[in-house]
Image (tube, rainbow, N blue to C red):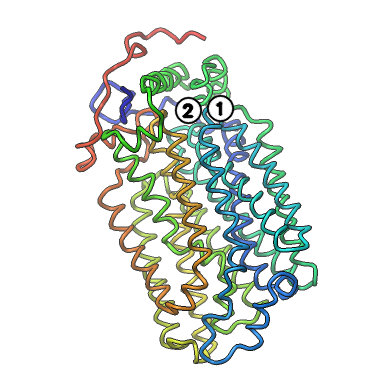
Amino acid sequence: MAGGVIVANDGDGPATDHGGRLTFSVVITCLVAASGGLIFGYDVGISGGVSTMEPFLRRFFPGVLRRMAEARPGNEYCVYDSQALTAFTSSLYVAGLVASLVASRVTRVMGRQAVMVMGGALFLAGGAVTGAAVNIAMLILGRMLLGFGVGFTNQAAPLFLAEMAPTRWRGSLTAGFQFFLAVGVVIATVTNYFASRVPWGWRLSLGLAGAPAVVIFLGALFLTDTPSSLVMRGDTARARAALLRVRGAGADVEAELKGIVRAVEVARQGEDGAFRRMATRREYRPYLVFAVAMPMFFQLTGVIVISFFSPLVFRTVGFGSNAALMGNVILGAVNLVCLMLSTLVIDRYGRKVLFMVGGAIMIIAQVGVSWIMGAQVGNNGSEAMARPYAVAVVAFTCLHTAGFGWSWGPLGWVIPGEIFPVDIRSAGQAMNVSIGLGLTFVQTQSFLAMLCRFRYGTFAYYAAWVAVMTAFIAVFLPETKGVPLESMATVWARHWYWKRFAREQPKTSADETNQPLAN
């Protein structure tokens, strides 16, 4: 029976890496795979800005423009409360949810690289359709094609990065996905800022979604699949060749390959499906909990809705359209800088330190926004906010974005990419992505209505959730810094709580010999 824990060493200490270096080949390979984040990032950054462009609203959502023109005191929180407008943003995530579940099976059969190629092609088609849209139906169709692309790439790219990266640099290289996501956000917000100055600018913003799709589509065509994926599909020779190319001279490729083969051999002993094992077997309980908790907490940081709707929030507190778009550009830049800093230290100080610091920063920021909006705008939005307080809202929003970029931004992709054993790795990542996209749909569809009804309490709501998730991480997440993927579950077997569920597996036949593996 396939268990939830696979141990790569015979000693009592944590397993060590196999001497893999940060070679040029692995850097280029991981950069191409991480560029899949451009797709998601561009969409995150583009949607909210396009939603504030008057030519776009006039063509597709004239009711919102009428509400803006007729807005009376007491209606500031509710002027953008339109289910049709939020459906423009959220429809992508329903499609992405479905695609990520399909992608789980496809990645096991065809490999990570093939799924990234498919995702890039679908996103390219979606960008073309949305840029040429003439009615809401065409707009939503294009968004759904974009969603299929996001679902495929978000499922495959983090797995590709985690499986290709040397253990010592796995955190930094896997965080590259979030780095490119942040780059995509910045590109999108800058595009919106300049495109808003021309009547057809919204078409330019939406159509340029094809540009990041070309990067991942063409780049993925030249990648070799990961050793773990190749071994699972029975191609040990290509897996060895892939390791030799990316690990460099001096690495113990045979030992790493044996660890991968051992993990796959244990995984194949299970007769039922990966999703069923996660849901029904006790030894998989830690993975099931974190497959649900990580995407749920990631969404409940509030950063997704702030990224989508920050131009609308900034207009609510008194900024004009161009100033609101510039505020969004600033948020993207802050996120990118903090993400770069996080990437430099993630493999030095570990994951939990970043979670704790980032959580504290986000709580302070959200409470600050809630307090200022409650004191200055009022419970029903009837008060005009003085400019210094409006600037303070932007500053606190930037602080929240900085905390996210330091912690949950990169770690929300790093942790799910590295904690699952190989037999459920595709299923675990699919569950992570699908839950995340499903909650993104719920939040993007409900945020403007929530802002209208909860008003400034909306931001206190997210602050409370950040406090809960920070405490959860402090207590229940074991540190995963420096642990090889094939040995990852040793940290679960030794954790004060999860050791009651996880257990070490007996040796397989691959452990009984020191001879090189056959092709």
Residue 329, picture quadrant: bottom right
Give how far across and how far down residue 207 sits, in percent.
75, 56
Q: Are marks 2 and 1 in contact (CB under 8 Å)?
A: yes
Indicate which disc residue 266 carries.
Answer: none
Question: Is 147 or 518 nearer to us in this picture?
Answer: 147
Question: Is 375 or 102 nearer to us in this picture?
Answer: 102
Question: Is 185 or 98 nearer to us in this picture?
Answer: 98
* Residue ID at (53%, 41%): 155
Height in image: 393 above or below 402? below
Q: What amino acid does circle 2 point to?
A: Gly
Give how far across and how far down residue 42 sits, in percent.
63, 56
Q: What amino acid does circle 1 point to?
A: Val
Counting other residues with Cα less than 10 Å from the Cα at mark 2, is it few (<14), some (14-19), or many (20 or more)? many
Task: Tell me the element at label 2.
Answer: loop
Indicate which disc residue 246 carries.
Answer: 1
Task: Tell me the element at label 1.
Answer: helix
Give how far across and how far down residue 77 sits, in percent.
51, 81
Question: Is 51 or 404 nearer to us in this picture?
Answer: 51
Image quarter hosting the N terminus: top left
Left or right: where 50 falls relative to 275: right
Indicate which disc residue 20 carries.
Answer: 2
Find the distance from the CA under tag 2 to the CA under tag 1.
8 Å
Residue 324, picture quadrant: bottom right
